[in-house]
Image: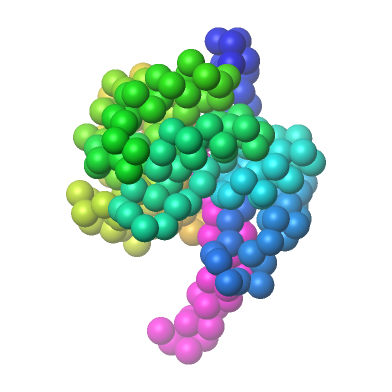
Amino acid sequence: MTDQRSADLLERLRSRLVVSCQAYPGEPLRTPEAMLGMALAAERGGAAGIRAQGLDDIRLIASQVRLPVIGLLKVSGGDVFITPTLDDALAVVEAGSDVVAIDGTRRPRPDGRTLAETIAALHEQTDALVMADCGSADDALAAQDAGADIVGTTLAGYTGEREKTHGPDLDLIAALAPRLRVPLVAEGRIHTPADARAALEAGAFSVVVGTAITHPTTITSWFVDALEGR
């Protein structure tokens, strides 16, 4: 992607909402067509971008939604499961992603490549931007040094380096924002519009929301728990 195209894409996302359209295996909405419907609804609601998981979902959404697509592939079987290998990342780009989201932690990758080697190969072989999904400040700074175009807080609270907060990890966002030269995307446990605004005010470049918009099972359980006093 040319520098101008990259700048234009990022400008479309600045201070805006990206909606993550994903469903867990075995759920009623776990089909590419259902996730396309979610993405189209998010586009109609004013989203600036879509985050999608799975090659079939990415292909379908990229073909019909007029928004930038952040694509990823979840691969079970290890701690590093978000687009864990270079081959996975290349497939995600080939499916139509404008941005490929990969595990951006400092943990060993299953194909033996370093994060820097993976990002360099993606930049050499594709025109996609690379988003590093990180779990801590050390991850984020290392990912920036490795060449990531975007850093996300996606894995904060899930790698053992930081406590899992009830809502977004605002302390991490506030600590990282002034130290990064690349856009910092807030993602993870953003449950309300107030959470999203707080993440932006803490220094996030843009905000990704998934569960609170596109996961009816969880949203329903929140209401059930409230009515039952849990």
Q: Magenta segment: does it hold 210?
A: yes
* Residue at x-position 43% and y-position 46%: 82
Residue 24 position in % (x across, y down): 54, 64
Q: Magenta segment: does it hold 94?
A: no
Residue 197 makes an appearance in the image: no
Q: Please state which of residues 54 and 151 is positioned toward the viewer in this rendering.
A: 54
Q: Quadrant of the C terminus?
A: bottom left
Question: Splitting the image into 4 quarters, where does residue 133 fall?
Answer: top left
Residue 185 position in % (x across, y down): 45, 36
Q: Which residues are magenta?
A: 206-230
- Position of 91 with respect to 158 (left or right) is right
Residue 214 position in % (x across, y down): 62, 59
* Residue at x-position 47% and y-position 28%: 130
Residue 90 makes an appearance in the image: yes
* Residue at x-position 44% and y-position 33%: 86
Vertical side of 89 occupied by 189: above or below: below
Vertical side of 26 occupied by 110: above or below: above
Question: Splitting the image into 4 quarters, where does residue 149 fall?
Answer: top left
Q: How is the image coloured?
A: rainbow
Question: Splitting the image into 4 quarters, where does residue 108 fall?
Answer: top left
